[in-house]
Image (tube, rainbow, N blue to C red):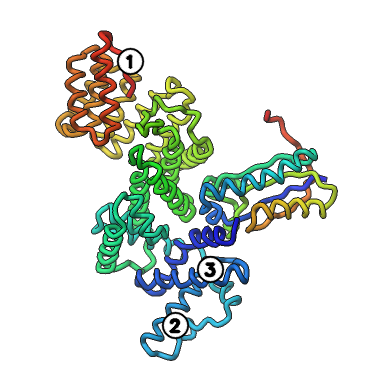
Amino acid sequence: MLYAILCYHDEDFVGSWSKEQDAAVMSKLALVQNKLKKEGRLGPVARLLPTTAATTLRKDDPPVVLDGPYAETKEQLLGFYVIECENLDAAVEVARDLGAANPGGAYEIRPVGVFDAGTRAK
Amino acid sequence: MTDVAWIDAAITSARPQAVGALLRYFRNLDTAEEAFQNACLRALKSWPQHGPPRDPAAWLIMVGRNAAIDEMRRSNKQDALSDEAAVSDLDDAEQEIADRLDGSHYRDDILRLLFICCHPDLPATQQIALALRIVSGLSVKQIARAFLVSEAAMEQRITRAKTRVARAGVPFETPGAVERSERLAAVAAMIYLIFNEGYSASGETSEIRMPLCEEAIRLARLLLRLFQSEPEIMGLAALLLLQHARAAARFDANGELVLLEDQDRTLWNQKLITEGVALIDKAMRHRQSGPYQVQAAIAALHSRAAKPEDTDWAQIDLLYGALEVMQPSPVVTLNRSVAVSKVRGPEAALEMIEPLGDRLSNYFHYFGVRGAFLLQLGRNDEARVAFDRAIALANTSAEAAHIRMHLDRLMRDSKPPVVRF
């Protein structure tokens, strides 16, 4: 079963990391990702730009385009993983590993209903 | 991340909001800063033991406020606390305060904090130093290092700035719409100054001063998060990101400045470029142009060109034309002339800068650019005169060295070489 792991964290906090801290977290995360890659379980991974770069389209009639993220929250959606896991326990296990590499904030684990890898070349 | 690094990042990111709120309570910058320092000391003790609070800013505000009130009570020998001030149970109060920190409040708190740093009475250098100390929380030592002055001199500069700000009185009422947008413009200008302080560094000092650019970007992002729909703030953030993206290519191994056209574009930071271009794209949808947006759009066109010859000079010429209307200045016209020389040739460009001679008679770049145009036209003797004048006016050894290179070529070649500016 495919699971999406949605990464929430305070982007002010993440933005306050020094370049070295950021690089250290990323290289620890890469270790977890590499393990999943070897097992053939790693789907798309994305790190999103800050919410200041976000635009929201409200599907009113007519649709309204607004600056900023959909939700004003203390912690923001900063990225996501899509990972093949046997069951929820395995997905929680992956989230734990990722969390150990990048503490703070929260991961929302959501089973994927429909998945289309798309056509974009690598 | 280690505990210490974690706490450090949490305090840094909470600082503008926390000091801003404490300033609103106490209406005195020194008291607010001291209260925040006290709260940080307690955080260093408490957080590793009890784990991080859910909302570090709310925690720091409340603990700082209580500490300052205790302090005042001790010094005033008052014994009764007002109900509002007496917060005994940390956990409940944290949530309560977090709820009270609704968007509008903390937005104005942070804006006020930034705004008092750019009081018109303060010279630019004091504005920047004050903002870095109060808003960013850099130590006096760090700021002194970035400004290449002694710690004592910087301490004095900041103290003087604080005295002036205190005398001027801080505006505490919630600002109206017009006032808010005036504050926003002043704060944006100050953030740009901080950036330029780092960006204009020479090769030897660029590494030391680079953190100023990074801090300015952090502040611009913060401001944009508070004012999500302001196209000029998007433009400012985009401009800083796009300029900073070139940092690794701007100096060669000897610390000499490398001109845009000669830079190794593979060294440009694509992540920053992506973010900058995304922001300028967003800003332009508002169709309310402004100087930051136009300058960012120019920077975006440069960063979109994989090779210098791919640069869309015609579009850059148009954008500089727009900038000339918004911010008429001989320097803008001079910059535009470089684009004009690419689109319509050196003769048209030379004609364009001819009238600027009086106002830019002591400006290094004027003579550098003028010399380059003359050289392209094969008017070597006149070019030599312009280059000589440029060398006399050079601000850094890198600038002088660059012009000397042209002069050397002039001596060597009989034919006019291709000069890039």
- Percent across and percent down for residue A91 are 78, 51
Against B200, residue B336 (above or below) is above
Judging from the image, mark 3 belongs to the subunit labelled B
Q: Residue at x 36, y 59 (%)?
A: B140
* A35 sits to left or right of B285: right
Q: Are marks 3 and 1 on the same chain?
A: yes
Q: Is residue A72 left or right of residue B379?
A: right
**Which mark, by number, is residue B418?**
1
Give the labeled residue for mark 3. B44
- Disc 2 is attached to a residue of which chain? B
Of all residues, the one furthest to the right in this rendering is: A86
Q: CA distance from mark 2 to mark 3?
A: 20 Å
Q: Residue at x 74, y 40 (%)?
A: A43
Q: Is residue B182 visible?
A: no
> Mark 2 and mark 1: span between their CA atoms?
72 Å
Identity, as a three-letter code, of the amino acid under mark 1: Val
Relative depth, front residue between A65 and B313: B313
Residue A1: image location, x then y, percent: 83, 45
Q: Estimate how packed mark 1 is, as few (under 14), some (14 to 19) or many (20 or more) residues with alpha carbons within 10 Å.
A: few
The Cα atoms of the two marked residues, 3 and 1, are separated by: 60 Å
User: What residue did someone put label 2 on?
Assistant: B70
